[in-house]
Image (cartoon, rainbow, N blue to C red):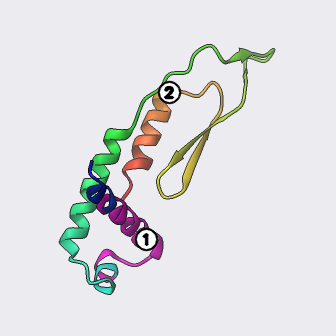
Amino acid sequence: MGQQKEEEWTRWRGLLTEQSESGKGIAAFCRDRSLPVWQFYEWKKRLRQGSADQFVAIEVTGTEVPTGRGRLRGAPVEIRLRRNRSVMVEPGFDADHLRRLLSVLECEA
């Protein structure tokens, strides 16, 4: 991607984050910044699709050590999400449950 395109993507990522954190509705936010509302929604859609392509599924094997009570020992893993949110995943998590949870959290508007 060219530098100008990357700058445009970065600009719109920042605007979407700013709007989300401002507590203002999209129309009011766009009006304050003289942005066309349709363009805001178009970039929101574009960025959502672009970030979905960047998700990488991983599988971790061989790091858990069973303890005496059937629990797994090891450090939790932090998964960082958009909008400065994160999820801590303890050893022994249910992978299908985690996939569903991440799908919901990452698709929130």
Q: x and y percent of residue 29 in the render?
A: 34, 80
- Circle 1 residue: 18
Q: Is residue 88 magenta?
A: no
In the structure shown, which secondary structural element does the residue marked by tag 2 occupy? helix
Whether 82 is drawn above or below 12: the answer is above
The stretch in magenta equals 8-28
Residue at the spot 28% in from the left edge and 85% down from the top edge: 31
Residue at the spot 49% in from the left edge and 58% down from the top edge: 83
Rendered-image quadrant of the C terminus: bottom left
Q: Residue furthest right?
A: 68
Identify the amino acid type marked 1. Answer: Glu
Whether 109 is drawn above or below 66: the answer is below
Gap between marks 1 and 2 measured at Cα: 32 Å
Q: x and y percent of residue 97 in the render?
A: 48, 32
Viewer-proximal residue among 16 and 100: 16
- Circle 2 residue: 95
SS majority, magenta:
helix
Residue at the spot 25% in from the left edge and 78% down from the top edge: 35
Residue at the spot 27% in from the left edge and 59% down from the top edge: 4
Determine contact: label 1, label 2, CB under 8 Å.
Answer: no
Q: x and y percent of residue 23 in the render?
A: 45, 76
Instruction: Report the mark closest to the observer, 1 or 2.
Output: 1
**Corner quadrant of residue 77:** top right
10 vs 37, left or right, is right
